[in-house]
Image: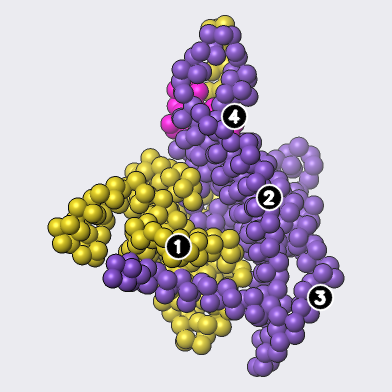
């Protein structure tokens, strides 16, 4: 009797989850094995043909390279800078609270807003970057129009928005470092760097795990910034895997093929987060 | 030794002031630019404002159909939020108290969804919405949010349920209370802190979401505030004072909330991330 009541409590959640998430996900797996396009009505099962095609698709290889570059740079800088800022704020500076509030502020902005602010900053005619470059005698700078700099331009926008997130998580974790430990080490003549390497860093490893996994997944899935700022261009210099799924399905109409790329993205996310989780968890210690 | 620390603190203070200015400058620039006349802005975009006008903001307010898009976003966010919190907390409660293999399997089934990116299901969902005739209907996004947010919501609630002593429920059962009564009258009121966390992360996540409304709410009347702004940039993208005004309109509700609640927002984000 008890089980029935408990199950009835799960049913509304299960219903929404099954209908609007699980069922479409399973359909996504099925459609990746079909030739579904928006041009014709019938949908035929074609086995692994989409995946075979994907392996030889230069555009997909480009997207994978773009996405991995993006993810590696994002994860590295978001964590290094986020940790650095958390340590600085943790030094109990005069305006620590204010610094924290300001640096975290971009995080709550919608991506359409943050992306457009930076589209302006990067614009070649009167944007800030171009003006600095002109005043240095380097001529007009078109950050997002140049295939060599466009991806970095998008990454900087994303970093500006997400560094605050990493910072507050690292900061919260630093609060759990026992004060006595730091004082004892100071009495023993350990400097700030030594304290960081031998005491703080080992104790905040759980926060490192969380932050790295978050930025890894956010990087692999990146879509909004690219869609708003560059539309994948110039050429396909910033075409991430997610952007490719979107364009293949909703601009070109290759629904089946786009589903297959979506599955490939899913595999990337699952494998890379599993590996980093294993790697990072080993380094966590108890206080 | 002490002196060295002082010098280092001072250097850090200066460095943090510079970094803070770099972080806030883009937002400061957006806000000031939206209140400048077109001529003034075109004359010296990076210079100090010499004019002050509400004209751009008012114009953008009408051009992006602000009341409509704001209301659409508000309806989607509030309704999704209520459903997510109610059904999510119920399921997490049942899972944590039920125990045994069944409960564990249901829990794993929910949390496994965290690995699936929306890119896998957004294409079938599009077809699904067409079949259900829900395209350009706010319900499309509400239903998908309720399904997709279950996974992290139940994960966070289930973690919190462990901190609520079971003896409370058991005492209520002995007094003859039903599970339904026990949950709503005794357990739910104790969920206040975690509810606050979830309201913050879910509301920000849904309000700022771009991809789902881009796919399912294309028509002008159905647009959310984010898509309203995106559509605005497609038409008036080169009119920068107009663009900044539309961006300020989109951002003001969030910045106001942030000014008053920044402590809670940061705390909520940390709690959600650490448990998620």
Callouts 4 and 1 close, C-beta under 8 Å: no
Q: CA distance from mark 4 to mark 1?
A: 38 Å
Q: Quadrant of the N terminus of chain B?
A: top right
Residue A62 vertical placement versus A176 (above, below): below
- Which residue occupies 35% across, 70% down? A7
Q: Where does label 3 land, which residue? A: A53
Q: Which callout, 2 or 3, points to the residue nearer the camera? A: 2
Q: Where does label 4 land, which residue? A: A201
Of residue A265 and residue A232, the one placed in the foreground of this image is A265
Of residue B120 and residue B133, the one placed in the foreground of this image is B120
- Which residue occupies 67% across, 43% down? A279
- Which residue occupies 55% across, 14% down? A185
Residue under mark 1: which chain is it in?
B
Q: Is residue B241 visible?
A: no
Q: Which chain is purple?
A: A
Q: Are marks 2 and 4 on the same chain?
A: yes
Q: Earlier in the sequence, mark 2 or mark 3?
A: 3
């Amino acid at each position: 009797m008890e089980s029935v009541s408990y199950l009835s409590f799960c049913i509304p959640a299960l219903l929404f989850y099954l209908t609007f998430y699980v069922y479409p996900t399973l359909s996504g797996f099925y459609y990746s094995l079909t030739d579904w396009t928006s041009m014709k009505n019938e949908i035929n099962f074609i086995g692994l043909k989409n995946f075979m095609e994907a392996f030889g698709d230069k555009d997909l290889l480009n997207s994978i390279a773009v996405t991995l570059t993006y993810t590696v740079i994002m994860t590295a800088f978001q964590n290094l800078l986020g940790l650095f800022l958390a340590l600085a704020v943790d030094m109990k500076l005069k305006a620590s609270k204010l610094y924290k509030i300001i640096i975290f502020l971009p995080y709550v902005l919608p991506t359409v807003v943050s992306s457009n602010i930076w589209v302006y900053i990067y614009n070649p005619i009167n944007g800030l970057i171009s003006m600095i470059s002109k005043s240095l005698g380097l001529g007009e700078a078109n950050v997002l129009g140049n295939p060599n700099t466009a991806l970095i331009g998008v990454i900087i926008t994303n970093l500006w928005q997400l560094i605050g997130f990493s910072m507050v998580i690292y900061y919260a974790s630093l609060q759990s470092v026992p004060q006595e430990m730091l004082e004892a080490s100071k009495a023993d003549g350990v400097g700030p760097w030594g304290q960081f390497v031998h005491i703080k860093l080992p104790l905040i490893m759980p926060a490192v795990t969380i932050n790295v996994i978050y930025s890894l997944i956010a990087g692999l899935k990146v879509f909004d910034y690219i869609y708003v700022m560059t539309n994948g261009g110039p050429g396909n210099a910033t075409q991430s895997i997610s952007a490719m799924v979107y364009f293949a399905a909703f601009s070109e109409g290759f629904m089946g093929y786009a589903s297959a790329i979506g599955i490939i993205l899913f595999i990337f996310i699952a494998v890379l987060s599993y590996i980093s989780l294993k790697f990072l968890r080993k380094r966590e210690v108890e206080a | 030794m002490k002196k060295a620390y002082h010098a280092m603190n001072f250097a850090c203070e200066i460095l943090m002031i510079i970094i803070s200015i770099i972080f806030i400058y883009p937002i400061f620039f957006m806000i000031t630019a939206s209140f400048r006349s077109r001529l003034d802005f075109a004359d010296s975009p990076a210079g100090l404002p010499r004019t002050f006008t509400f004209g751009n903001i008012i114009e953008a307010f009408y051009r992006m159909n602000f009341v409509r898009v704001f209301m659409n976003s508000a309806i989607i966010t509030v309704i999704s939020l209520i459903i997510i919190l109610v059904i999510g907390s119920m399921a997490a409660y049942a899972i944590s108290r039920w125990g045994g293999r069944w409960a564990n399997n249901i829990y794993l089934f929910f949390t496994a969804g965290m690995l699936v990116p929306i890119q896998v299901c957004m294409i079938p969902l599009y077809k699904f919405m067409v079949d259900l005739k829900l395209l350009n209907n706010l319900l499309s996004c509400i239903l998908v949010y309720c399904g997709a947010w279950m996974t992290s919501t139940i994960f966070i609630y289930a973690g919190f349920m462990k901190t609520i002593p079971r003896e409370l429920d058991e005492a209520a059962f002995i007094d003859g209370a039903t599970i339904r009564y026990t949950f709503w009258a005794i357990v739910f009121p104790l969920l206040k802190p975690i509810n606050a966390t979830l309201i913050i992360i879910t509301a920000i996540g849904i309000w700022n979401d771009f991809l789902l409304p881009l796919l399912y709410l294309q028509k002008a009347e159905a647009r959310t505030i984010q898509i309203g702004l995106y559509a605005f940039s497609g038409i008036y993208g080169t009119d920068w004072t107009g663009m900044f005004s539309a961006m300020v309109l989109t951002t003001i509700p969030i910045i106001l909330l942030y000014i008053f609640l920044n402590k809670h927002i940061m705390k909520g984000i940390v709690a959600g991330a650490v448990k998620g």
